[in-house]
Amino acid sequence: MVDPRATNEDLTAKARIRNAAMDLYAQYGAERVSLRAVAAEAGVTLGLVQHHFKTKAGLEAAVDQLIVDYFAHAVASVPVAGTTAEVAAARDEAVRRMLAANPAVVNYVRRAVLEPSETRIELLESLVELTRKEVVGLREAGVASTDRRESTQVVSVLIRQLGELLLAPLVEAVWEQVAGPGETERPRLSITVHD
């Protein structure tokens, strides 16, 4: 899978700034991180951050696009071959692997989706649009059902791919409260959406 973030050696100053912002936003929340803090983390001047992104909103939009790119690359890494269930499972697994390999993406998405504001809803809208395009493409390719409503399929995909990510802290907290001595195998979360 192509890494939309790449490595610092391969990056332009603009990409390093965006990556530093994602890391800081994931850790502290975008509203708590200044452009000056992003500049310091990226090892650049505040003026360079403003040159590339103009405003904090411009930088947040670039980070949102990076997150969408992570999801798009994960899904695109799976060939559209096999049954509907096989393709869906393979795509869900590709997203799961991508998220496991990128904790900052997980934390960023959690913050953006669970702490939404008028200015932070764009990420969810972008993920919905990406998923809608994927569903439409699979329907046109004859891989996804056209008997189910497209809207239900979009919700189903997003719940399967994001549900575990969003609910994992709750599962972990509950497990810590109820696990008996010697119980180390945590339950696995499984989510299903029905029409």
Image: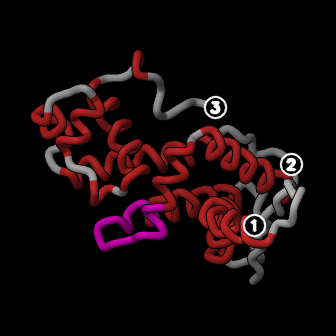
Side of 96 where 3 appears, left or right? left
10 Å crowding of disc 3: few (<14), some (14-19), many (20+): few
* Alpha carbons under labels 1 and 2: distance apart: 36 Å
Which residue corresponds to the image point at 86% horizontal and 48% vertical from the top-left?
82
Residue hosting label 3: 1
Q: Amino acid at mark 1?
A: Trp
10 Å crowding of disc 2: few (<14), some (14-19), many (20+): few
Residue 52 placement (x, y as % from top left): 19, 36
Residue hosting label 1: 175
| Residue closest to the far front | 181
Q: Which residues are magenta?
A: 111-124
Name the secondary structure under disc 3: loop
Q: Amino acid at mark 2?
A: Gly
Residue 10 placement (x, y as % from top left): 41, 18
Question: Does the segment drawn in magenta span residue 7?
Answer: no
First in sequence, mark 1 or 2: give its number.
2
10 Å crowding of disc 1: few (<14), some (14-19), many (20+): some
With respect to residue 70, does 86 lie above or below?
below
Q: Amino acid at mark 3?
A: Met
Mark identifier at residue 82: 2
Which residue corresponds to the image point at 21% horizontal and 49% vertical from the top-left?
34
Name the secondary structure under disc 2: loop
Which residue corresponds to the image point at 77% horizontal and 56% vertical from the top-left?
88
- Judge depth for marks 1 and 2 and give the one in front: 1
